[in-house]
Image (tube, rainbow, N blue to C red):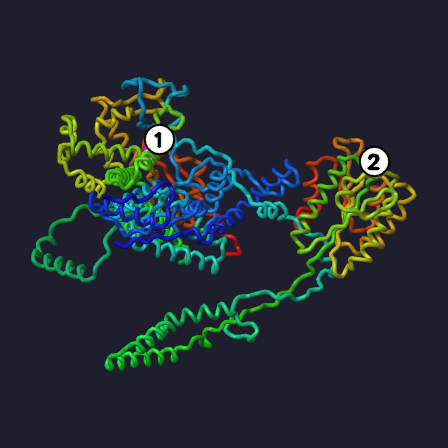
Amino acid sequence: MPIHIIDRRLNPGGKSLENRQRFLRRAKSLVQGAVKKTSQERDIKDVLEGGEVTIPLDGMHEPRFRREGGTRDMVLPGNKKFVEGDYLQRSGQGSAKNSGPGEGDSEDAFRFVLSRDEFVDLFLDDLELPDLAKRKIAQTESEGIQRAGYTTSGSPANISVSRTVKLALARRIALKRPRKDEIEELEAAIAACTDEDERTELVAKLEKLKAKSKRIPFIDPLDIRYRRFETVPKPVAQAVMFCLMDVSGSMSEHMKDLAKRFYMLLYVFLKRRYKHVEIVFIRHTDRAEEVDEQTFFYGPASGGTLVSSALQAMHEIVRERFNPSDWNIYAAQASDGDNSYSDGELTGMLLTDKILPVCQFFAYLEVGESGGSAFDLSDSSLWTLYERLRNSGAPLSMRKVSERSEIFPVFHDLFQRRETAQEKAAP
Amino acid sequence: MTERLFEGADWDFQTLQRITDACEEVALKDLGLDVYPNQIEVITAEQMLDAYSSVGMPLFYKHWSFGKHFAFHEASYRKGLMGLAYEIVINSSPCISYLMEENTATMQTLVIAHAAFGHNHFFKNNYLFKQWTDADGILDYLDFAKNYVMQCEDRYGRIEVERTLDAAHALMSHGIDRYPGKKKLDLRAEEKRAGRRRQHEEEVFNDLWRTVPKGAAKSRSAISIERRRKLLGLPQENLLYFLEKSAPRLAPWQRELLRIVRHIAQYFYPQSQTKVMNEGTATYVHYRIMTRLHQQGRITDGNFLEFLGSHTNVVFQPEFDDPRFSGFNPYALGFAVMQDIERIVTRPEDEDREWFPDIAGRSDVMGVLRDVWANYRDESFIGQFLSPKLMRHFRMFHLHDDPEERAGIRVDAIHDERGFRRVRRELARQHDVGFIDANIEVVDVDLSGDRRLILHHHVIKGSQLNETDAKRVLQHLADLWTYDVALIEVDGNDKVLREYVVSPRPIPAAVA
């Protein structure tokens, strides 16, 4: 009896991927809830690493007709001391109650592991870039070229040699074209042959083979394959993200930490929408400078506070390096809200006239001390200023944050899909 | 002078070939097994997880519930909560066995003996598998099913297909024919039969019969109910079949989907009825083959000890008060009974002669076992072949838990002279699927009224349906039936215990 032994280990994996995606799609709202819950408890970096989530089993339950209750009979192994007619206490340990059949499927939560991509996907799924409709400047589309399989016609430059040879080989084998060594072998046999009859027979055979190999070409036009390319429209795929932060003495480590978390989230979010994301860090005291990330978050600095200096710096950088027609510009500003009183007017002007018109999105995040309730009582000078601007119609997003756990909700809130926000407002 | 099959733990594909040949020799010559051609495939852990999620089949249609199982298995495997099976074997022809790549050479031998010969023989010979499954066609059918579901998704939308499949899955355990259906009618045979009947009528014709007074005519309504039920083929316990054939508003593709789910449920039905026997057979066969290979000197003592180690783990039966206990281990029970049969056939004691007069001392072990493997299922197998000696060995006892009984759970019988038969009967019942699954059937349809579908659940021993689950399943059923569905739970005296009525959910407008 023939036995086939097959090595399947090299088969492509991920056979269950499709089913898994279906499951995630179906469980989306549950998983999303779980993802948000988990993400509040973790650091940003860990959050975006994916990991285990738990969803209530109830939501993904597959019902069946099940029987329960009634009188039960069971046969068990390992009798030690019972004799017929004994009674066992129901609740006591050692009774058979805890091991009866049909019990034990009381698991109420379902845990599984999400990959990093799945996690980020779900985490950011209901978020959307704001105000894209407002700005058409991002739509300058260029065309890109992309591989798209093989075709039977095309320009000679695009011949796919490997594919062509492969097909030719298959055809030659299928049509039994004589191989080169077969012919050589036969020729050698003829040369070595002494018997005349046999010789003619061999020669005839050789002729036949040669004729056949002429009939069946080595490469047939049928075999030729060309690489196919397609042009695909490419949207502007680059964005720049400006991180503005007040680093004056009044900003504590905690506040910087909050700001950092927000920037990271924004970065991850932009990264998913754009192929190429640049970050510009601008820190300011009473004067602003562009710095690298380390200095931005950890470099020591002191001095007064002039917000306008940062905006001015940003404006200049935009003008020099980031042409708004080529770049999508995002900015997030973090501050404790202090600004010198005299600077207010200049700040407002810069913002409305220079910065906001070129930005896709400008967010102001006011960070406070953890548990700082005084922070909520009176609005800071910057907040008051921005609020006034916003009320007069400037596209500004602003939020206050004082706890780590608030970062995610605030972020979500800012980037909530617009139609859902409207729906919420409508009824 | 025989060569060793392998040394140490490493193996390659030549080794597998040698192992399979050696196992085959023992299986066919010494044990007289009759198997499908074998196909052995080596797979990785990830592929094994894939296989887990689609009930072990190499190809299956796409559905989220398989993804759910995959996610669940993967999580518990990654955490080390769960080991993976050494093999999976598929009841098909050729019989496909999947072996894990990380098994040692000894384990591969064990697994080949177990799956490729033990299970394989059982699949090919047991009457249930012969009756209900088509080993030659199953893979083609699954392929068809997969493509069909995919086409339906393209044509009618994924959500619609998913809704139908969800509903069908909920009813899957009630989509099984428990008794062989009618044979397909053969036109020529039918004509012959009709001819014979006519001839008989002509021969016995007597005009006098016409004058014999008839009994009281049946009332019209009684006739119409009977006629209606007959037309619809009621009562019908195969809910999926009934829906496929009689649900008024299903689209043809939905009927086909129901049919697919039903066929697959039917394919697995024998497996759920023969767990103990199937595993018992495979374990017994691997034990015999491995022992024989060791006797022949083809396996070293060390490898044989490794085999005994895993074999002992497989047939380990914890006692009821052991934290590891979770019911009878089918491997342990099946293997023990089969070894016991071997003992009864070769070295019977007086007790055995009294209990098993047919087989005691017949000395043809394999003949008896092959007969057992071919003609029994778990329930009848335990009911007939569990010996008093084995009941004593396992120290079995029977508990009767009546919630009405204040004193507690009664020990109804133990492994003694008075209890043997009762313990055995109870254990056999525990393995009877007909007894485990709820007995639900379609009894009537109110055709002249609101088309309500009426089902009965015949409650056994006061065990009613879980309410939340029952409601959900009925909701699915109502969605397919598209009119109200009523489920009535009745006990043995036709007393109504509970009644559920569920209305179908409106179909979203976009679909209609």
Residue at 69% of width from left, 64% of height from top? Answer: A141
How far from the left and from the top, in percent, is residue A126? 63, 48
How far from the left and from the top, in percent, is residue B507? 49, 52
Dot 2 corresponds to which residue? A250
Label of residue A221 in the image? none
Asked whether B147 or B367 is in front, the reply is B367
Callout 2 secondary element: loop
Q: In this view, does A26 lie to the left or right of B249?
A: right
Residue type of the residue flagged with mark 2: Ser
Magenta part of the chain: B311-316
Q: Which chain carries label 1?
A: B
Residue at 10% of width from left, 57% of height from top? Answer: B200
Asked whether residue A6 is drawn in magenta, I would say: no
- Closest to the camera, between mark 2 and mark 1, is 2
The local crowd at label 1, few if under 14, some if 14 to 19, many if 20 or more residues have their Cα within 10 Å, is some
Q: Give the quarter of the figure containing the N terminus of chain A.
A: bottom left
Label of residue B327 in the image? 1
User: Does the rendering let one see residue A355?
Assistant: yes
- Please determine if labels 2 and 1 lie on a single subunit: no
Q: Mark 2 lies on which chain?
A: A
Callout 1 secondary element: loop
